[in-house]
Image (cartoon, rainbow, N blue to C red):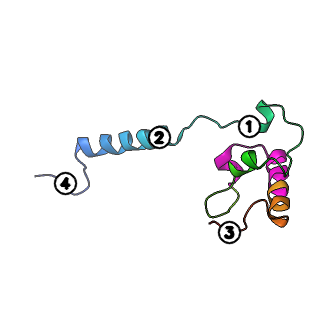
Amino acid sequence: MRDNNTKPVGAAQGAADDKVKRAFKRMQKKKVCVFCTEKIKEIDYKDLPRLKKFVTDKGKIIPCRMSGNCAAHQRELTEAVKRARMIALLPFKGE
């Protein structure tokens, strides 16, 4: 007979393996800022092909944790997208 307090050996080992797998799965390659790598000084609101890469189909601006932009360039990008929206170069909502 087995005590209620003891676990089978395989179950404890399986739980540890799952933790390792989950931790390894979360580790991803760090994203780099596109604007820093291309050494772009200023983000222009008239550069629509570049701005469209950072806007979703619904019209939302992609956050820096997903795009990989640094904080300074993300702020510039947000400002450029908002300016482009105000003069109707980019839509406020998705199409």
- Image side of residue 91 versus residue 57, left or right: right
Instruction: Kindly state the secondary structure of the residue where label 2 is placed.
Output: helix
Closer to us: 72 or 81: 81
Camera-near label (3 vs 4) is 3
- Image side of residue 57 versus residue 39, left or right: left
Please check the rendered image and state whether residue 66 is part of the magenta-colored stretch, yes or no. yes
Closer to us: 89 or 51: 89
Residue 3, disc = 4
- Circle 1/circle 2 CB separation < 8 Å: no
- Give the mark nearest the N terminus, 1 or 3: 1
Residue furthest out toward the bottom: 93
Residue at x 59%, y 34% (from the top left corner): 29
Closer to us: 64 or 46: 46
Q: Which residues are magenta?
A: 62-79
Camera-near label (1 vs 2) is 1
Q: Give the CA separation, mark 1 to mark 2.
A: 25 Å
Find residue 71 and report its horizontal and vertical position in percent: 80, 47
Above or below residue 45? Residue 85 is: below
Find residue 79 and report its horizontal and vertical position in percent: 85, 57
